[in-house]
Image (cartoon, coloured by chain):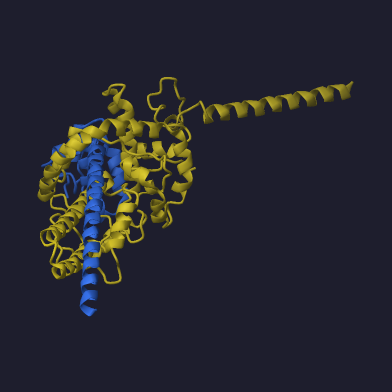
Amino acid sequence: MSNYTNSPCAACKFLRRKCTSDCVFAPYFPPEEPTKFANVHRIFGASNVSKILHEVAPHQREDAVNSLAYEAEARLNDPVYGCVGAISVLQRQVLRLQRELEETNADLMRYASCLGSETTSAYGGRRG
Amino acid sequence: MSNTKNIHKGLLERFLDLLLIALIIFMTLKGGTSGACAACKYQRRRCAADCPLAPYFPAEQPKLFQNVHRLFGVRSIVKILEKLDETQKPEAMKSIIFQSYVRDRSPVYGCLGVTQQLQYMIWLAEEELKAVNSQLQLYRSQPQNGQNQNQNHNNHNQMIHELGGDNKQQEDVTSQQLDLGMGLNVHNNQSNVVTPFFSPLLPVSETQQPQMSYTYSCSEVNNNGYSPPAYNTDSGKEILTNNNNVWGGQNRFLYNVNNGGGFSNQNESCHEMKSNNGVMAIQSQLVNLQMASNHQQVEEDEDAHEYDEIHQFLEIIDDRQSFADSKEAYASSSGGSLKEQIDEIGENELRSAATCFSLTSMN
């Protein structure tokens, strides 16, 4: 954890304040990744991020920060759709695959039912 | 004389009371309908005629703005809107509202969790498709060998089961609403199934049946609920290729595994999964490869359908009735009835691509 004797975290560097030992951002915004905090701050704001971090459990904060960083970068790259564009693309893909799976399963069932009738008739023939 | 005075005084007081009541009613009506938008109401300020947020946050949907305010903040929203054209603003606000809603429902993973889960579902579907296709090939190549086909069919059933469900479950997956509330029962005891995205599926506690159920309350919504636009943006695909490579490939996201559907147990179940070593970590490089190979196929289909779907989405979002109707569904979301509500929604939801969610008032 950064404090003022060590290198301040990226958040405190960006905000130009002293990085104390209990800085909430320090574990998740290392000084080597200044862009990460810059993006998150631009889109969400430091205070919102801080509130979100306080609302989640400590062991989940890293994941929360990473997901926020992802969303922030997505929003910067695409101010209109952000990360929702990717979700939409994926959903369409899921739909397409589901349709294809249905059709293929239907084909398979047709083959299986044909096989079933052949096997039954063959077995019945042998018995009879 | 004094009686007359008293009578006049009483009448005057009554008149003043009536005037006051009329004024209060007028102010209430003003604030409740054509008055302040949800954003200005929340901030307790006068809603100007040119309020930039008023078109997107109706007064009867305060929760919408609360979610957005919690995640983005007013200043950030206004800054985003200022940089956009007039035609782009409604779309941007819809995506922002959706993103905020998702974050409200899933405070840790937000939209990234949705993305990851969709990727996993795609992988599952592709694996199953490969298995089914290989089985079909066998059938086609040996049409006269009845005995072999019977055996192969049994093998196929076993394979399907191993991949995560029997036929009944497959039907459930395909028939239920294909929104972000798709649920898959993954029986996590198949150690021979190794996914490219995850570490080998480790058995969870025997008492626990992990259920990959990312059921938003969006699935509770009525048929006219809010759907995300069918975005076909280059940046959307770019995001997919860059997914999980954002910060040095160290992103390891836990799937949100719920046992009862809904997000109420999200944090708890994640914690349980961790403690039971049932953690599935996503490998970013494999995700990128997977996504890159899928993009080209998706692109052709998307171009044809994008325009129609965006228009459909615009019609849906303009239907204010949907917000009012979905209130009841949203209110009942905290229970375990999400799956039942998913099942009720029909094929139309499939066509409208999927993410419907309820934007309702919590008041």
Count of numbered circles in the view: 0
- Determine the colour of chain A: blue
The residue closer to the viewer here, B31 or A119, is: A119
Residue found at x 37% / y 40% = B67
Vertical arrangement, residue A101 with respect to residue B84, above or below: below
Residue B214: x and y in percent read 31, 53
Left or right for B75, reference B135: right
Residue B201: x and y in percent read 18, 63
Residue found at x 44% / y 20% = B49
Left or right for A6, reference B55: left
Residue found at x 37% / y 55% = B264
Toward which corner of the image does residue A69 lie, by quadrant?
A: top left
The residue closer to the viewer here, B361 or A127, is: A127
Residue found at x 10% / y 48% = B285
List the single residue furthest toward the front: A128
Image quarter hosting the C terminus of chain A: bottom left
Toward which corner of the image does residue B6 lie, by quadrant?
A: top right
Q: Is residue B254 visible?
A: no
Q: Is residue B178 visible?
A: yes
Residue A64: x and y in percent read 25, 48
Toward which corner of the image does residue B350 lie, by quadrant?
A: top left
Residue A88: x and y in percent read 26, 40
Left or right for B82, reference A19: right
The residue closer to the viewer here, A72 or A124, is: A124
> Among the chains, which one is yellow?
B
Left or right for B248, reference B14: left
List the single residue furthest toward the bottom: A127
